[in-house]
Amino acid sequence: MTQIRYSATTHVGHKRKVNEDSILALPDQQIWVVADGMGGHAGGDFASQSVVDSVAMIDPTLAPVELLRAQRETLNRAHEMIQAESQARGGITIGSTVVTFAIAEGHFAAFWAGDSRLYRLQGGNSIEMLTTDHSVVADFVMAGEMSWDEAEHHPQSNAITRAIGVSEVLELDKIRGEIFPGDRFLLCSDGLTKYATFSILERVLSKEPIETIAETLQQIALDGGGADNISIIVIDII
């Protein structure tokens, strides 16, 4: 089994009364999840918790190929649970972004919907964003009209176009690739990326030890304003 170390934290931030983010770390199964709920108190936290609870139910004895299939199935199950809860509450909008990360047989695989992100720092060098936000401003970035850092300050920066529980059919994107010793991966909600630019992330991820990296990044978001919930998972491949 691949040797890993990780650091994880979630924080309500300075402005919100409730933490609508949820995180999951299953190092024995080598699965990690960040989910960012929306729908207000008791709505967003229900949605994000439904996501992580569903993934936590995956059978740890599954073979790697089956494990990936199970991730997709559990996210679809969470999608249905959130939709049912939305109807029970009179049709209000409840949903959650998600980014998952799993390791098996020298490879990683990630699923995502929304604007929670996965980054990789390889060999201590430049940082790479492995996911692409499902958001209104992402379309502007992909068209070359602005950078991801600039998009964080756009008036529509919070307008996402995909989330678990919102659309009739859940649309997930997936990325997979090889892992190598020295790789460092970051999963986070937008509560961090509102305040941590690519250059800040690159600098901190390249220098900070795994024991303190999540708290250091969290403090950057809090010092920047902490207007949203903040969730961070950092995973080192040894």
Image: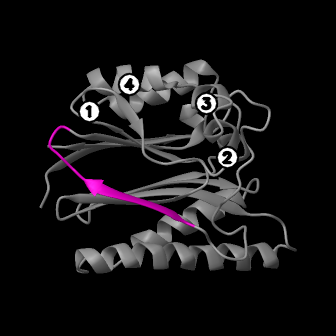
Q: Residue at x 27, y 60 (%)?
A: 30
Viewer-side residue, 95 vs 124: 124
Residue 18 got which mark?
2
For the magenta stretch, what is the residue range?
172-182
Q: Is residue 180 magenta?
A: yes
Please, is residue 43 above or below residue 238 in the view? below
Quarter occupied by the N terminus: bottom left
Q: Earlier in the sequence, mark 4 or mark 3?
A: 3
Q: Residue at x 45, y 20 (%)?
A: 200
CA gap between label 4 and label 1 equals: 17 Å
In the picture provided, is 144 more to the left or to the right than 181? Answer: right
Identify the image's colour scheme: rainbow, by chain, secondary structure or one colour.
one colour
Q: Earlier in the sequence, mark 4 or mark 2?
A: 2
CA gap between label 1 and label 3 equals: 23 Å
Q: Which residue is mark 4?
A: 202
Name the kind of residue labelled 3 in the image.
Answer: Lys
Q: Which residue is mark 1?
A: 211
Viewer-side residue, 45 vs 109: 109
Name the kind of residue labelled 4 in the image.
Answer: Glu
Q: Which residue is mark 3?
A: 194
CA gap between label 4 and label 3 equals: 15 Å
Percent position of residue 214, x then y = 38, 34
Q: Earlier in the sequence, mark 4 or mark 1?
A: 4
Percent position of residue 31, x then y = 33, 61
Percent position of residue 65, x then y = 28, 77
Which is closer to the viewer, label 1 or label 3?
A: 3
CA gap between label 2 and label 3 equals: 18 Å
Other residues around mark 1 within 10 Å, as few (<14) / some (14–19) / many (≥20): few
CA gap between label 4 and label 2 equals: 30 Å
Please, is residue 111 above or below residue 61 in the view? above
CA gap between label 1 and label 2 equals: 26 Å
